[in-house]
Amino acid sequence: MDKNNKVPEVRFKGFEDEWKNMDASVIFKTYFDKNHPDLPVLSASQEYGMIVRENVGFKVQHNKENEAGYKRVLPGQFVIHLRSFQGGFAHSTVEGITSPAYTIIGFRDKSQQDDIFWKYVLTSKEFIKRLETVTYGIRDGRSINFEDFSELGFEVPNLKEQRKIGKTLTVIDTLIRKLEQKLEKLRNIKQSLLNQMFINVNRGGYTPLIRFKGFEDEWMTIRLCDISKKVIEKNTTSVCRDVFTNSAELGVINQRDFFDYDVANVDNIQGYYIVRPNDYVYNPRISTTAPVGPINRNKLGCCGVMSPLYYVFRVEKQSDGILHFLDYYFKSNMWHDFMFKNGNSGARSDRFSISDSTFSLMPILYPPKEEEQLNIGQVFINMEKLMRTESIKLSKFRSMKQSLLHKMFV
């Protein structure tokens, strides 16, 4: 951006005037309108601005009689709430009332300002950083004093340019929300299919709820030790120097890629197990997405080593069918009942404890025909490919928005 000429780095065609420097006190003023207890109560949301509290199922115990003292908020106004370390200015598109502890501000001259433009200004990273100079207090969310805020200066375009900028960023935000919703829908579909295309051996039945046409054979029960062996080959000669980790979200990856540095001392990994391509790794560390710990396959195409805390096993008669089937079987929760029944969280609440010998007895129901194994795996491979495509689009739009926020303002 060109600070000397007071024009942004990126600008719409047809706008050439310099932006005017104006103090916040010239643009905004406070509003103090009480005695509207019949209006809905609004809550301040960092992501969505002011929202009707009842619409999001958010209930706060309070005396209804006190609502007469709540402040009225009109569409197009802003609420200065207490979370100043995140911003503290919530834009409202709805009419309602909010806590008397908050400060309500609006424009002195609505005909010269666009509230959507200012929504992006007052929630931008640059503005939030500037707030550090006018915030005070030590409680959660330092207080913002309107008198101090009113002394801040802003470079302001005319109303027409404000509206153009606001509409452009709104379109991008709409696309971002649609992509987020699409990704969430795909995640839900994937989870539903994981629950219906595999069988929990502890709950009876030998056919899944959803199955491809043409396959009617009952699935077979095997134990993990029937098709795999525990890897006990150690890195005694330090032939492998790459240390792997097993992430619930990212799978088996190089430790350096995951942590941006080496957690393990590469000069002291002789006691680590060697993990070869297509070996599976069980990580006993539990999380919200992996309540008994994750099992993932090494798809890196190279060897590495894993801490002895992990259980590494190798499928003996490997085929694309069984490998793809197991990949997604272990992403389902069909094996969790066995784990909960035969293990526990142990002395550490963040790790699941189960003996190697018991773990190897895990029963698995699987289709005997490789074609069905391949079909099941391909469903999830295709779905994850689609999710990656949508995720890349989402990242691009988010980056585009951040770039425009940086270049479209002075």
Image: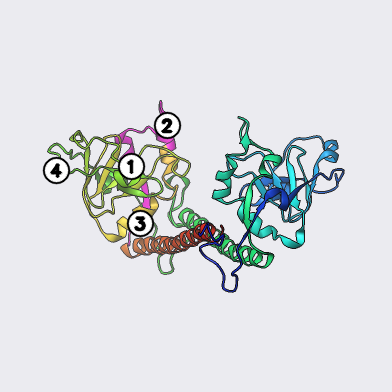
Residue 288 part of the magenta segment: no
**Mark sitting on residue 344:** 2
Q: Which residue is mark 1?
A: 282
Give coordinates of residue 39: x percent, y percent: 82, 49
Left or right, residue 332 beside residue 107 = left
**Amino acid type, callout 2:** Asn
Bin the neighbour count of mark 4 within 10 Å (Cα to Cα): few under 14, some 14-19, many 20 and up.
few
Whole-number angstrom distance, CA of label 3 to CA of label 4: 31 Å
Give coordinates of residue 151: x percent, y percent: 67, 44
Quadrant position of residue 352: top left
Quadrant position of residue 33: top right
Q: Viewer-nearest of labels 1 and 2?
A: 1
Which of the marked residues, 4 or 2, is nearer the chain's N terminus? Answer: 4
Q: Which residue is mark 4?
A: 239
Q: Secondary structure at mark 1?
A: strand
Magenta residues, start to end? 340-369
The answer, for residue 189, to whether it is visible in the render is: no
Q: Residue furthest front?
A: 4
Left or right, residue 336 beside residue 313 = right
User: Circles 1 and 2: CB distance less than 8 Å?
Assistant: no
Give coordinates of residue 134: x percent, y percent: 62, 39
Q: Secondary structure at mark 3?
A: helix
Q: Is residue 265 above or below residue 400?
A: above
Which of the marked residues, 1 or 2, is nearer the chain's N terminus? Answer: 1
Q: Which residue is mark 3?
A: 325
| Front in this rendered view, residue 4 or 147 | 4
Q: Viewer-nearest of labels 1 and 4?
A: 4
